[in-house]
Amino acid sequence: MKTEPSRCDVLICGAGPAGLVLAIDLARRGVSARLVEKLDRPFTGSRGKGIQPRTQEIFEDLGVIDHIIARGAEYPPQRFYSADGRFHDESMVEPFEVTAEEPYHLALVIPQSTTEGVLRAKLLEYGRAPEFAKELTDFTQDAGGVQATLRTPQGLETVQASYLVGCDGGRSFVRHHLGIDFPGKSLGIRALTADVRVPGLSREVGHRWNDGDMTAQVGFDPLAGSDLFCLQVPVPLEGDVDLSAKNLTALVRQRTGQALTITDVEWSSVFVMGARLAAKYRVGRVFLCGDAAHVHPPTGGQGLNTSVQDAYNLGWKLARALERGDEEILATYEEERRPIAESMLGLSQTILDKEKEQGGRKRGREVLQLDLSYAGSSITVTEPANRPLAAGDRAPDAPFTTAAGLPKRLFDVFRGPHSTLLAFEPSIELKPLVGGQVYRIGEHGEIRDTQGAIARSYGLAKGDLVLIRPDGYIGAIVPESSFERLSPLT
Ligand SMILES: Cc1cc2nc3c(=O)[nH]c(=O)nc-3n(C[C@H](O)[C@H](O)[C@H](O)COP(=O)(O)OP(=O)(O)OC[C@H]3O[C@@H](n4cnc5c(N)ncnc54)[C@H](O)[C@@H]3O)c2cc1C
């Protein structure tokens, strides 16, 4: 039996990483949102376990980074075994210099289920939680909103929302229902991944046998915060795969020649790697976000990260559309995020091809996602055009001293749902901005650039203004004579 429709501003379908991040971002903005999930309990596997530095910055803004770091670990070195039983250890990451501009420079390993648990705990701080065992089964939309039907253990429920966001994964119901194409390709690789116990196997390193051989490769990665390893093994494209501990033990022994025993399988999945990108991210009042809009091969650990960043790009725009009736900003979600997913798909594939051809898994700076930029987006303004840092680029961190003489970082003032205006030694009176916090940098300002770090990393001269968007990208970088251009952007 259907009930009377309940109302909310945003209905989020799917409580994976993308849905949870969107729910937190909307909650901290005071937007009424519901997060529905068809599973009757939280997902338990390790799946997307690499958290890249840019995502760590977002997690800092959302107030969860220390909880994530405390439960995760740095990528351990990889131990490569040769046929004669000898091995050598290699670091997976290029060593990057730690700089004040980039406080997070190493990818973290943390099981996806742990990340989701931390995000659910944060959501609960706002008095909200995913609604489990509620599956979106139908929706219609008109100019006034979206009417959605949920299947629940108590029967059908109707929800009236201003917007619907499909964060419902690679097989997205929302995408299918909208009839959005999902072109791309299957990559001709089928793999099993399983979270397993292997007593006696060293947890100091990841273990790789037959690296680069897509018919015989075996990998075990220790999962932080548990006594589990994530086992990854390519399997034939066709046929059933027995995922019992007994069969996995036999498979691993046959491929490695080692007397390893898998005693327990906590979670497992068999999947065909694919690279696909939705033809559109939006139809009217309905959006696609995360894996619903793009699927990647797991190489390079980009899938979850790209999904979290989609949600982070969409959250403040939905809030602005609801608060200020600024519907136009919603078009910039696809404009900014679809090209990023396109390049991430290319990157994951390039890494996969390299792995197939040469073995080895060393990752370069390109996987960190710190150089992603929305430069050229229709909501960015750079004046004059030839600046070292342009609007659309990521806003770097920098140390400074407060007017009270305390040490702080720019990320401290960016943290929260607001925009931030930095005015470098301004000579004009700065009016307050709706939704924007204003800081003057200078000898008598709120921010004292005592080490010259802000001027250096932003390339600022006297009278320059930098508007930092709520998602940590530069929205505008202009001389103070263009102050009036900023208010529509805050
Ligand atoms: C086997 C495997 C291994 C992976 N390994 C890696 C890796 O090593 N590194 C990496 O970065 N990424 C990896 N990924 C990708 C990563 O897990 C995803 O990118 C990430 O989970 C995407 O998050 P999401 O929130 O968009 O979607 P999901 O995590 O898929 O969440 C979607 C949620 O929507 C729910 N849902 C679906 N339909 C409905 C409906 N109709 N109503 C209500 N709820 C619904 C689902 O139950 C699910 O909980 C892997 C993925 C898989 C499948």
Image (tube, grey):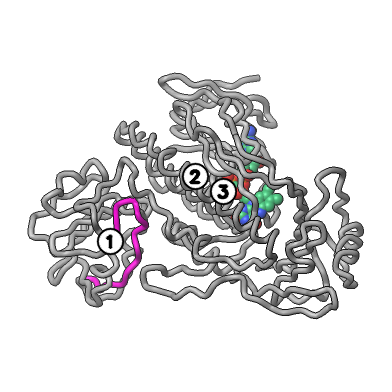
Q: Are marks 2 and 3 in contact (CB under 8 Å)?
A: no
Amino acid on which the number 3 mark rests in the picture:
Leu
Q: Residue at x 69, y 78 (%)?
A: 89
Is residue 259 visible to us here? yes
Do the CB atoms of the residues marked 1 and 2 lie less than 8 Å apart? no
Whether residue 112 is visible:
no
Q: Amino acid at mark 2?
A: Ala
State whether label 3 is within 8 Å of ligand 1.
no
- Of residue 369 and residue 43, the one placed in the foreground of this image is 369
User: Alpha carbon of mark 1 to alpha carbon of mark 3: how far?
Assistant: 28 Å
Q: Which residues are magenta?
A: 388-402
Where does label 2 land, which residue? 23
The 10 Å Cα crowd at callout 2, few under 14, some 14 to 19, many 20 or more, is: many
Mark 1 / mark 2, whichever is N-terminal? 2
Disc 3: which residue:
345
Task: Count residues near mark 1 (Cα–Cα under 10 Å), then give few for <14, some for 14-19, many for 20+.
Answer: few
Q: Which numbered disc, 1 or 2, marks the residue closer to the eye?
A: 1
The residue depicted at 71 percent of the width and 71 percent of the height is 206
Examine the rendered structure and indicate whether residue 200 appears above or below residue 344.
Answer: below
What is the quadrant of residue 198 in the picture?
Answer: bottom right
- Report whether the residue tagged 1 is closer than 8 Å to ligand 1: no
Give the Cα distance between marks 1 and 2.
35 Å
Give the residue at mark 1.
Answer: 388
Residue 457 falls in which quadrant of the image? bottom left
Quick check: 425 above or below 14? below
Residue placed furthest toward the front: 357
Which dot, 2 or 3, sits closer to the camera?
A: 3
